[in-house]
Amino acid sequence: MNRLLIATNNKGKVKELQDLLKNTGIQIVTPTQINLILEVEEDGKNYAENAGKKAIAFAKASGLISLADDSGLEVDALENAPGLYSARYFPKPGATDADRRAFLLQNLKDKPRPWKAHFHATIAIAQPGGEVEFAEGNCFGEIIPTERGNDGFGYDPIFLFPELNNTMAELGMEHKNRLSHRALAVMNAMPVLERLFGV
């Protein structure tokens, strides 16, 4: 039972989590690898509810310990929007990441800069019996009006680390996976994984 299922269908998240967990001694599997097709509605009132719901659903469906995350971008000038609704931050269904970035920048254009913001991630690790544990991570920066970089997804091209003068999408996976909210949440989740998997 040394297998951990990544409980998401988001290819960007799968790639990032696989990279973050590659040296743990735990065998990482994806829904595609075990032919699991599962959509979980993210209707929780906070990040933990959404992450927990996904992790538990995937764990029960697969019989494997499962790791899910829920994350969001919180922009100070927009009273922490889009937050919980970051992946659905567009008035019409079927929007792309580029649509959501453009909509965010449209909503910020009359606000004074710098547009301070942070990414938040909550990770949930669920066992098939329904037990679930959580860890969190945050990273801080600002939103910029022009997209830069090709190495990320979501809001990465407009999220700048001012001290590095790089956006999240300019960092490359190795650097990103030391600084990102998801990286910090995984780091904080390691004691749980070590206990469950004996690594």
Image (cartoon, rainbow, N blue to C red):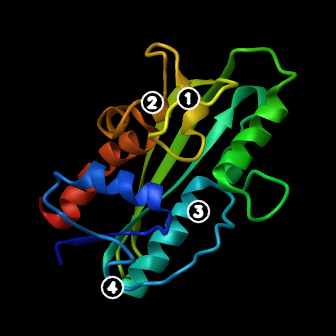
Compared with 88, 63 (above or below) is below
* Amino acid type indicated by mark 3: Glu
Q: CA distance from mark 4 to mark 1?
A: 41 Å
Q: Are marks 2 and 1 in contact (CB under 8 Å)?
A: yes
* Amino acid type indicated by mark 2: Glu
Quadrant for residue 15, please give it: bottom left
Q: Is residue 99 left or right of residue 3?
A: right
Compared with 44, 168 (above or below) is above
Foreground mark, 1 or 3?
1
Going from N to C along the chain, the mark reached first, 3 or 2, is 3
Going from N to C along the chain, the mark reached first, 1 or 3, is 3
Q: Secondary structure at mark 2?
A: helix
Read off the residue under disc 4. Answer: 63
Going from N to C along the chain, the mark reached first, 4 or 1, is 4
Going from N to C along the chain, the mark reached first, 2 or 1, is 1
Compared with 95, 137 (above or below) is above
Q: Picture coordinates of residue 165 (x, y %)?
A: 48, 16
Foreground mark, 3 or 2?
2
Read off the residue under disc 1. Answer: 148
Q: Nearer the viewer, residue 32 or 74?
A: 32
Q: Residue at x 33, y 83 (%)?
A: 34
Read off the residue under disc 2. Answer: 170
* Amino acid type indicated by mark 4: Gly
* Amino acid type indicated by mark 1: Arg
